[in-house]
Image (cartoon, rainbow, N blue to C red):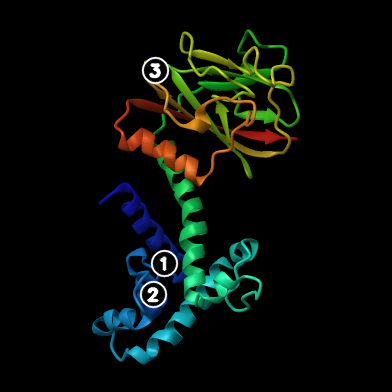
């Protein structure tokens, strides 16, 4: 089984638990969801799904499949209604201006949303948590010091609390043999590549296992690093023996502060895990306070 297949199985199991809470009887709908929304069954007709269900359920016939799918869609909408609305998905009132949707049945519209929108975001969060669990979290590998403290790391920077709208230097000190640094940031609504980036760190080589950002010559050298809203900011460092050959990891002025999205993060995961590279990960989070 590939990593992708394993992730899809975890995803469908998790969504099943969310739509059909354990302890409540909805075995018919649950089985229907797992079969109808399985990627392997996309080309199958509803009657084919019904025939797979019949041997496993009492009193279930082909005539029951369409009402059961309707019940599944109702529960899917009840659980994820807000996300569906944000994504402009509504299989009850399909727009006449969207002919592609007019050719799809409600379950097909829901299926495409589940696998083309919901899954990539779920996968990105799952990969992040997987890397975080693999990461070492020694104290003080990452800290922030005020604008005037570029050359030192004082106790103020060792606290996992930073102030909103205050210019900081970011200090990194990693005890590792590798020297090519990738530094990812995840905030409440943001996902940024901090290093390498034209904004803060055009050079991603650690010198004597240390780095200070913004680097001299970076676009944000004068402005320093600021956080404009209170909340939690997470940082995940990945250190490799050599750089990954991905276009978005090459600093450029057109995208000085790259955003990592599901596609890019999956590329990163593939480059790290499936290609057998030697790497280490480090994690730390901070509370931004007003």
The numbered mark, 2 or 1, whose residue comes first in the sequence reads: 1
Residue at numbered disc 1: 16
| Vertical comparison of 259 with 251: above or below | below
Q: Residue at x 32, y 54 (%)?
A: 5
Residue at numbered disc 2: 30
Choose top left, top right, bottom left or bottom right for residue 20: bottom left
| Vertical comparison of 104 with 270: above or below | below
The numbered mark, 3 or 1, whose residue comes first in the sequence reads: 1
Where's residue 75, x and y in %? 51, 75
Label 3–label 1 contact, CB within 8 A? no
Q: Is residue 25 visible?
A: no
Tell me the SS state at disc 2.
helix
Tell me the SS state at disc 1.
helix
Label 2–label 1 contact, CB within 8 A? yes
Q: Residue at x 36, y 26 (%)?
A: 279
The C terminus lies in which quarter of the figure? Answer: top right
Q: Residue at x 60, y 72 (%)?
A: 90
Q: Is residue 1 left or right of residue 240?
A: left
Residue at numbered disc 3: 176
Where's residue 286, x and y in %? 60, 32
Where's residue 8, x and y in %? 37, 56
| Vertical comparison of 144 with 265: above or below | above
């Amino acid at each position: 089984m590939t990593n992708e297949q394993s992730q899809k199985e975890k995803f469908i199991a998790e969504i099943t638990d969310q739509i059909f809470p354990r302890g409540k009887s909805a075995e018919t709908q649950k089985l229907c969801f797992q079969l109808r929304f399985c990627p392997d069954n996309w080309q199958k007709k509803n009657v084919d799904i019904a025939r797979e269900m019949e041997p496993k359920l009492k009193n279930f016939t082909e005539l029951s499949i369409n009402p059961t799918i309707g019940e599944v869609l109702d529960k899917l909408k009840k659980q994820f209604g807000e996300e569906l609305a944000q994504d402009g998905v509504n299989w009850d009132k399909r727009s006449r201006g969207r002919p592609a949707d007019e050719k799809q049945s409600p379950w097909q519209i829901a299926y495409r949303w589940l696998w083309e929108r919901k899954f990539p975001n779920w996968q990105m969060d799952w990969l992040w948590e997987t890397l975080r669990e693999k990461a070492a979290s020694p104290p003080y590998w990452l800290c922030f010091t005020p604008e005037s403290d570029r050359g030192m790391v004082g106790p103020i920077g060792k606290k996992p609390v930073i102030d909103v709208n205050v210019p900081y230097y970011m200090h990194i000190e990693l005890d590792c043999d590798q020297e090519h640094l990738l530094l990812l940031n995840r905030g409440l609504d943001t996902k940024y590549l901090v290093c390498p980036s034209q904004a803060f760190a055009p050079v991603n080589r650690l010198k004597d296992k240390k780095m200070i950002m913004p680097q001299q010559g970076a676009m944000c050298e004068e402005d320093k690093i600021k956080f404009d809203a209170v909340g939690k900011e997470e940082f995940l460092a990945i250190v490799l023996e050599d750089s990954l050959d991905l276009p978005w990891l090459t600093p450029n002025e057109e995208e000085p502060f790259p955003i990592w999205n599901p596609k890019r993060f999956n590329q990163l995961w593939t480059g790290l895990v499936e290609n057998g590279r030697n790497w280490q990960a480090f994690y730390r989070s901070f509370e931004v306070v007003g």
